[in-house]
Image (cartoon, grey):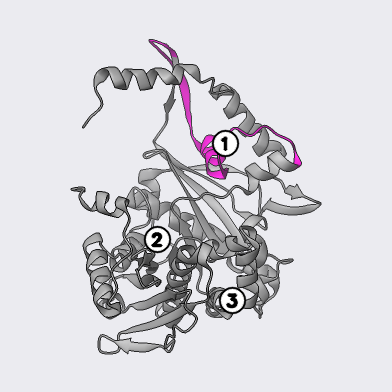
Amino acid sequence: MTLDPVHFDGIARLAGRIDHGTDERDRRALAETVWEEFLDPLVVDGRPILEPLDERARRLVDCEAVALRDREFPTEHGLDAGTINPTTFKNGLVIDIAQAAMSATPSDLDLHRSRTTVMTVHSNDETMAVDESWGKFDAGYSKSRAVKVPPLPRFAEGVVHALALYLSESKHARDHAQTVSDLLVLDGPLYPRGLLRWADQHPDLADFLLEDPRPTTVLENYVRLVEEFVDRSVPLVGFVKNPATRVITRSLKSEREVSVPWADDSALFTRLLERGEYVDDVDGDRWERDDSALSYTNWFRSRGGVDRPLSTDGDALGVERRLERAAYEVTFFVIYDPRDDLLYRIEAPYAFTKDPDTRERLTMQLLQDVAVAHGPPTIVEKADELARISNAEKASLRETLEDRFDAAQDRTYDDHRWDEQPY
C-alpha cells in the first residue's frame, strides 16, 4: 500500500519542526577552515595522525581529458570477495561462506576461473569439530577451507562474516600475486578494516584478536602481500567505494572542541572538493554543482583509528613486519566525482607512495579509471561480478546446507516477509 497524499504531506511537514543548525554557506566556510588550519598535520595527544605526503592541495582534472590520456599501467588486476552473509541454523551453527576471485585486463580466463572459498563455522557446542585443512576442487583451479570459530555468542555473526571474507580474499591475493605484473586494485581497504575495528568494540573481541591465531593469520596475509609486492616493485592499492572513516571529525570534536556538522570524514571531503556556485532561484538561491571535472586531494599519511595498528608505533596485532615499519603505513587520497555526487578513497602502502613518481602515476591511473567507468574502476567491478554470490545462489546454498546438516535455517518473520517481496 502506498502513502496517501495527505499522509505524505503530513510526514513532509515534520521537516518544518527541525532547525537543521548551521547554514550551508557556513558549513562550507567551516570546511575551508578545517582544511587550512587543522590538516597539516592533524595532531592528537602530541602525535600526528594525519599529515600530507607533499603539499596540501586540491586539484582538478577534466573528465574527458583524463579518460583519453595514455595509461600509466598497461595491465591491471582486481580482487574482490563475496559472501552469502551469516546464516543461523536450528542446530546452533552460525555459518558464512565467502569466495574470492581475481580479474585481469587484458582478460585471463584461467585466472578468472580460479576461486578461493572459505566457510566459517561457529557453535556453542564445544564438541563440534571441523577439518580445517585446505582442499582443491574444479580440477585444481580452486581452493577451499572450513574454519571453526571459538564460542563468541554475542558476536558470532560478525566474526564468521569477517573471517570468511578476509581469509578468502587475502589467501587468493597471495596465491595469485605472481600473476600481477603492473598494478593490483583491491575492492575495499588495503588492510582488513572490519577485523582491525574489533579491538575498539568490546573487550571480548579484543581478547579474541590477541589470543586466537585466526585473526592474526588473516592480518599476516595482508602484511605478507604488501611485502611481496614491495619486493617485486609492483604497486597495489585499495579502492574504497563507501569510505566511512571518522578520524578527522572525531579528532576535531575531542581535541579541538570544534562543533562538527559532518557525519564522517567523507562528508567533509565532499564539501571541500565539490565545486559550483549559488544561483538565483524562485525561493531565493540554490547551489548549482559544476560536474565538468573530477576533483581530488593530495595523498595523506594516516595513523589514526583502525590505521594505527599498521603505523610506525602500532603493534600490527603482533604480526612480524620484515620491512621498515613506515613501509606498511596507510596513505590515501580521495576523488570526488560530481557526476554522481560520490566520493572514493584510494589507499596504498607508504612503501609505494613515498616515491613522488609512483604516487603521481597511481593518482592519474585511478582518476582515469573513475573517469572512464563513471564510477569504481572497471577492473574492480569485474572482480565483483566474478566473486558475487547472487540471491538465488545464496538461497540454494542455504537449502543445500540444511540438507547436509539435517537442520533447518533458523528463520525469523523478517526472513519470511522479505522472501515474499518481488525484488
**Range covered by the magenta-colored residues:** 255-284
Q: Secondary structure at mark 3?
A: helix
Q: Is residue 109 left or right of residue 144?
A: left
Task: Inspect the image, locate mark 2, and give the three-letter code of the amino acid beneath it.
Answer: Arg
Q: Secondary structure at mark 1?
A: loop
Mark 1 and mark 2: span between their CA atoms? 36 Å
Relative image position of residue 369 (x, y in whole percent): 38, 55
The residue shown at (23%, 70%) is: 399
Q: Is residue 236 magenta?
A: no
Task: Compare marks 1 and 3 and give the one earlier in the sequence.
Answer: 3
**Mark 3, other Cα within 10 Å: few <14 / some 14–19 / many ≥20:** some
Which quadrant of the figure has residue 291? Answer: top left
**Mark 1, other Cα within 10 Å: few <14 / some 14–19 / many ≥20:** some
Q: Which mark is residue 262?
A: 1
Which residue position holds label 2? 71
The residue shown at (27%, 73%) is: 402
Q: Say above or below: 147 vs 17.
A: below
Which residue position holds label 3? 216
Relative image position of residue 60 (x, y in whole percent): 49, 41
Which quadrant of the figure has residue 29? Answer: top right
Task: Inspect the image, locate mark 1, and give the three-letter code of the amino acid beneath it.
Answer: Trp
Q: Nearer the viewer, mark 2 or mark 3?
A: 3
